[in-house]
Amino acid sequence: MTESTYRIQGATGEWEVVIGLEVHAQITTQAKLFSGAATAFGAEPNTQVSLVDAAMPGMLPVPNRECIRQAVRTGMAINAQINKYSRFDRKNYFYADLPQGYQISQLYHPIVGEGQIEISLDDKNPEADVKTIGIERIHVEQDAGKLMHDQHPTRSYVDLNRSGVALMEIVSRPDMRSPAEAGAYLSKLRTILRYVGSCDGNMDQGSMRADVNVSVRKPGEEFGTRTETKNVNSVRFVMQAIEHEANRQIDVLESGGKIVQETRLFDPDSGTTRSMRSKEDAHDYRYFPDPDLLPLELDDAFLAECRASLPELPDAKRHRYEKELGLSPYNAGVLTADADTARWFETLIAASAAKQGKAEGDVAKAAANWLLSELFGALNKLGKELGDSPVSPEAAAELLALVGDGTISGSIAKQVLEKMLETGDGAAAIVEREGLKQTSDTGAIEAAVAKILADNADKVEQYKAGKEALFGFFVGQTMKAMQGKANPQMVNELLKKMLS
Ligand code: ADP
Ligand code: MG
């Protein structure tokens, strides 16, 4: 990938931006990291709190096997080193949302070591412009509770539902060089987490959030001092925070100031960041191994099960769609960016192939084009997502089979789809009921063509004089006269014959 692309022009020359992300991803499990309390989003405050989560004296944490398993599977999905030995440490600090007085995390021996993720900024051809972003580590830790502040009267409340929920902290190397790269990295990471099923990736619900580390330097120089903007909760906000923060740092440096290493907050309303605390008042967390927990030691059988349970991952799937199904790089990229979309598409081509008695590779292209332009377009108009599409992949396969065997034309298929979405009826039933079958009746089409040519004698003259673009006009008029039901290939052939 070309790194020379993103530079910010300052008064003293061009600046390069350096970005590293620390992503907190909530592990998708029924229970918390060290207790059996539930983790569902949106529950009434303090209804999902066990004695462990409330830090009652004498309570002992018990690691949730499923949380460990999901962290390991995630590590495998980013080709990372999996550490068979890892350990939990206490990170000590006081805050009202942290009843234990410490967070159980993994500082010295994280469960996952070095890995990487490939990103691309080129939608049209994701394979032409690949950059590898290093991942330093993934560790597992507890989330804290949540404070809520009322203004009238001035009161604060604490909700401990989130207390003890399992998080993965995924720490990247400072390998990104533009807001777009950071956005691509975050999107790709989210895609991978959703494929693996280790995190739902819902940033608006806080189940994935990023701490954004940004510094600037003149190209070729050493890394500059960085700031860290905490808890940014959308891809767009991450990109905005970087943009703003880089420009702010450049202004400070160019007016003779220094960047202080500090924690900052992002304000979504203004798109700016502001200081929260500087590193000087940073806590000394007095990390030490948690004496209530044994080190984790993973055996080969556990690791083998984790690996065997991984699905086909997005990059591999994209390759396969291109190589085996013959899709364009763009279509393959769009269809695999979301695990649910890929699943829908795969059900569609399996059903299509079965209905048409063909191989999946022979129906995939038409199915992909139809899904991405026709169905997505129609759903978009209805304000619906693929997940709540009234048309199932099997019903769609029936429609595509009717196009495939020439029963209806592509333009009639659009009408049929609209009716399917409206009524929930099957494609064949609609075609039958509304008399939409394509006609290959040579006589009828010939008559229509003859009439169009007679009615447009002037255009026929122009066509014969060399204005060949008019051919499309004649096709369109004939199709219109036949209410879209004429076999397009026959219309073309008859027109060519009668115009020559
Ligand atoms: P700490 O231990 O102080 O948290 P780390 O070395 O773990 O620091 O880095 C935390 C995050 O900051 C990582 O995502 C890393 O990529 C990023 N980072 C480190 N140095 C820089 C820098 N100079 N500019 C931007 N990001 C950086
Ligand atoms: Mg750190």
Image: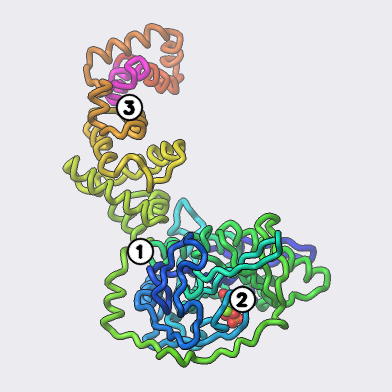
Instruction: Identify the residue shown where x is 31% and y is 79%.
Output: 303
**Residue 336 image position (x, y, % from top left):** 38, 55
Name the mark on residue 412: 3
**Residue 94, percent from left and from top:** 62, 82
Which corner quadrant of the image does residue 211 belong to?
bottom right
Spot the residue most to the right: 255
**Residue 481: in magenta span:** yes
Callout 2 amino acid:
Ala
Look at the picture and state if 421 lies above or below 147: above
* Residue where numbered disc 1 is placed: 313
- In which quadrant will I find the C terminus? top left
Crowd tier of the residue under label 2, counting other residues whose Cα lies within 10 Å: few below 14, some 14–19, many 20 or above: some
Q: Which residues are magenta?
A: 478-497
Does 34 appear in magenta?
A: no
Residue beneath the point at 35% across and 78% down: 65
> Measured from the top left, where is residue 143 in percent x and y?
51, 74
Name the amino acid type tagged 3: Ile
Q: Residue at x 28, y 84 (%)?
A: 300
Q: Which residue is mark 2?
A: 96
